[in-house]
Amino acid sequence: MAEIKSMEHSTLKVPYEVLNKKFRVAQKNLDRELDQIQHSSRDVENLITRTKILPTVDEVGALVGNVVDRIQILKRKAGESLLEELNAGLVCKRKIQHLKVIVPPDSNVCYDAWQASIDQWKRTRMDRIVIEYLLRRGYYETAECLARKSDIRSLTNLEIFHTSREVEEDLFKHKTLKCVLWCNDNKSKLRKINSNMEFSLRVQEFIELVRSDNRVEAVKYARKYFQSFEKTQLRKICKCMALLAYQPNTETEPYKTLFSEARWNDLVLNFRNENYRLFQLSTQSLLSVAIQAGLSSLKTPQCYSPNCKNPHCPVCQEDFNKIARNLPYSHCVQSRLICRVTGLPLNEHNLPMMLPNGQIFGQLAVPEITREDGAVVCPITNTKFSSPKVEKVFVM
Amino acid sequence: MQSADVEALNAVGKELDRVIYKLKDIRENAAAEIADVATLLEELMKVLNKAEQEMSGTINTSTQVDAPSDVDDPMADEADMQVEMEPAKPRLNDCQVKHVLDTLHKANERLQRISAEHRDLHGAVSKVGKVIDRNFVSDFTATTRVDALQDEENLMLLNKVMAKHYCRQGMDDVARLLIKESGMPEEMAQEVFDSESSFAEIYRIWKGIQQQELGPALEWATRYSEELIAKNSTLEFKLHRLAFLQIMSRGISAQAEAIAYARKNFGKFIDRFEHEIPNLMGCFIYLPMGIDNSPYKHLISPQVWMEASYVFMKDACHTLGISKNSALSVVINAGCTALPALLNIKQVMQSRQVLSIWNARDELPIEIDLDPEYRYHSIFACPILRQQTTEDNPPKKLTCGHVISNDALHKLSNGHILKCPYCPVEQNADDAVRIYF
């Protein structure tokens, strides 16, 4: 399996979902406007055919005028929504092109230049991954700033999260309006994924009516909205209705939980999840998955033993060290030895040598740790050996 | 980038192109049709207006009892009994009625066709989604048995690592915003800004080269000239070459300056770059017509700048002994290499229903083939047991110099006597010594 295939699903799927949505919106707009045109045409027909006497030119003219006006509206609406749809398609295309950027080296490009372009691409990829994570965590300003600074706005999904940010802020303020609008906006899709977001919202609104002691209003509200959920949520509706009998400060469960302010925070989390599902984003962010896979593949037992640390190794650094504590170690069936003095691999050109204390270094490092008087100082334990026997070691 | 990636991207690209192509077509078609229908109806309006004018001249004398009268008209009561004073409205004749109906009918039919055409696009659009799903992995989760990034403490540590990374990249404002939005504790935030200052200068210069600004880079390279030469770095020459070409690109007027620059700076590279320097001098031939029209135009392409910045980053970090990449980028890039392999093995293990083996061990199920530069520690895998050695099962050197793990040593020894598995030497198992890599 290859890197792009395994990691870039959401990079393409999200703009695709946008395209799909724009397609449906465009279709809806077209059909609605055409309906209107048909409607006003029918008015003309009715006028002409229903009356026995022929209609006056005036009347017909006015009604035909209506049709003409409607067609102008269609023209504008169709133009707008088809353009939006096309742009959504082009956004998809741009993302594919971004992913395609890395081409195998050809003879015209020298190695350094090729490496440089890969390096640049990886940098951009990392910024993309980080931005997605920041958005998921709700650090919108940071994400915005990073996208601006590294100039990759067009490669991110900032727009989608922008809407969700507004909804979330609204919910944090204990307001439901924007979320209700969002539910309406995505109604068919939400139904398809069996979302209970709208129901949770309606329940919250009901709870707020009860809390403010508008119990009659609450009943009216329930009559209006709960019916459509009757099939799937009847049990929950029953519990909700029971709230009418309790005071907001009740200690009885489950009514206490329903009345609790924390339910608003659950709504925010619920909303976030539903939004991911809507755009087919996975529940875990790519950053979190990539970091854990990366830490595991770098993690060795040495990272956790105090005198074997390598300052360049990320897992040896304090922060990652803690994060990686419970992750699995890397797996290795073939020895891979590196000299701790020179950083060079140990192989037939740089044979491993053992000091009397069992510490192994490369042949090339021996002159570096030998003093002028022939004494050798072990760089790990600082033990001094005067003219020691440095033995060759054979590693298969 | 692997061929599977290219194939997957091409598959999606093909479907998407189809949609875009059709969509462009529909859009143009719709605009034309709507405009056409609109003119059709406007003409109809004109015909009606004309008819009204013509007819009002001829029949305004005839009286109509049933002409619509305005009920709000104050004159209505008075006019009740007498003949309508207003001129009668002209009426359509049969032929005109037919024309109106026909035109409307046709207009509606044509407009409906636009909608139908657009609706037909649905198949193509949803195909794109299907091809994406088929070619890309949607669920990359659960490659690890525990999710370390769940508890708040680790999440905050991750924020700190990210802040450090962006601080190091010279994007202090990103780091500051992150600290603010994540509510990072004061002392952690302080650590972020203290940690990466040595890298900041390198990063600034690197960024400068990308923006085609050479001054600071040249100054740095001159300062570390000796070290760079010792490492056989091409950096200094590459920078001077860019500076030279920058002068050259100003055209013929800069010729004297360019020659002076070459005399002054290329001298010390003569031995190492005996082929490149003649090439550069060759540019003078094409100076009058501009280097971008010459065989040397590859020397001034944007890639050259990117390459120079890359070489600078690599060699400068090497010279100063600091890591070229931040911890975060090393981990993420390693993760990006590891993920495909892990997903693959997960799939295989799942299909054979042995996924539990993975969960039972404290190790990844496969070896990840990382870049050699990402290898920071020696790992000794026992050649007999094919296992990494650990504190409990350390590597041991036999008297003959061969290294095996402690467990293997116990398995192979017969009482105290051990025959080395790699050479004929027989020895006392107790003589093996523990070694450290």
Image: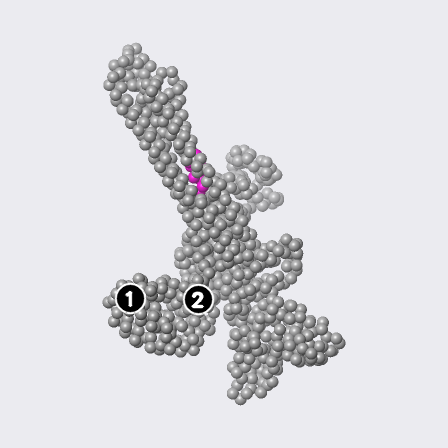
The answer to whether marks 1 and 2 sit on the same chain is no
Mark 1 belongs to which subunit?
B
Q: Chain of mark 2?
A: A
Name the residue at 55% across, 61% down.
B338
In the picture, the quarter occupied by the C terminus of chain A is: bottom right
Task: Please tell me the numbered disc located at residue B268.
Answer: none
Q: Residue furthest top?
A: B81
Task: Compare residues B336 and B183 and report the one nearer the observer.
Answer: B336
Q: Is label 1 in contact with label 2 (beta carbons under 8 Å)?
A: no
Nearest the viewer among B76 and A219 is B76
State left or right for residue A306 relative to residue B183: right
Dot 1 surroundings within 10 Å: few (below 14), some, or many (20 or more)? some
Q: Quadrant of residue B72?
A: top left
Q: Is residue B305 above or below residue B396?
A: above
Is disc 2 placed on a helix, strand or loop? Answer: helix
Q: Which residue is mark 1?
A: B286
Answer whether residue B78 is visible to the viewer in this image.
Answer: no
Q: Depth check: give the residue in front, A372 or B297.
A: B297
The image position of residue B17, as x and y in percent, is 44, 47
A20 versus A32 height, above or below: below
Amino acid found under the numbered disc labelled 2: Tyr
Q: Residue at x 37, y 25 (%)?
A: B102
Image location (x, y in percent) of residue A391: 61, 82
Q: Around disc 2, counting alpha carbons within 10 Å, would you say few (fewer than 14), some (14 to 19), or many (20 or more)?
A: few
In-image side of B337 versus A60 (left or right) = right
Rendered image: mark on residue A111 = 2
- The part of the chain drawn in magenta is A22-31
What kind of secondary structure does the magenta stretch mostly adopt?
helix
